[in-house]
Image (spheres, rainbow, N blue to C red):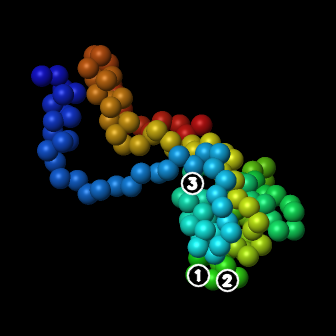
Amino acid sequence: MSQTEELQQTVETQEVSPGFSHDNLEGWIPSMATPEEIFAAMEKAFDFRGDVTITLKAGSKIEGYIFDRRATGNIYQSSVRIIPKDTKERITVPYCEIAALAFTGRDTAAGKGWEAWLRKYWEKKEAGEKNIGIEAEALD
């Protein structure tokens, strides 16, 4: 039995706590017609590891990375904080001012989870590579 097969057998018999999977949100434009839809979309935007584009009710757009949010349950008291794409400025946007949201960026961590790393590690080891480190891959 190869080391890869042994590892797979070991992993299948171990108890592990369940993780969570990230949805493939690239290109998604959620409906934001109700407060519930707004809160759900903004939670996904906060978890997304790429840029989003927020269209404000005033008509302007902000493209960037959402790094923080304050969700109070009331759209007039909730907000997100975003770093626009071409600046280091941090902007706070109240939920009540958001007309639309689009997941326009690439999810920089997609496919780079622990399982993918472990599979690559064992493939390299099976191929006879030496000095296989435990360094993370660049996120681009």
Residue 133, percent across and down? 36, 32
Marks 3 and 2 sit apart, C-alpha to C-alpha, by: 22 Å
Residue 59, percent across and down? 87, 63
Q: Which residue is mark 2?
A: 77
Locate the N terminus and report the quarter of the image it occupies: top left
Q: Give the image quarter of residue 72.
A: bottom right
Residue 104, percent across and down? 69, 47
**Is 124 positioned to the left or the right of 85 in the image?**
left
Query: What residue is shown at x 77% (from left), y 72% (from top)?
Result: 97
Marks 1 and 3 sit apart, C-alpha to C-alpha, by: 20 Å
Element carrying mark 1: loop
Q: Is residue 47 above or below residue 3?
A: below
Q: Is residue 138 above or below residue 103?
A: above
Evaluate if marks 2 and 1 touch, with contact meaning CB atoms under 8 Å apart: yes
Is residue 67 shown to the viewer in this render?
no
Q: Choose between 68 and 102: the one closer to the eye.
A: 102
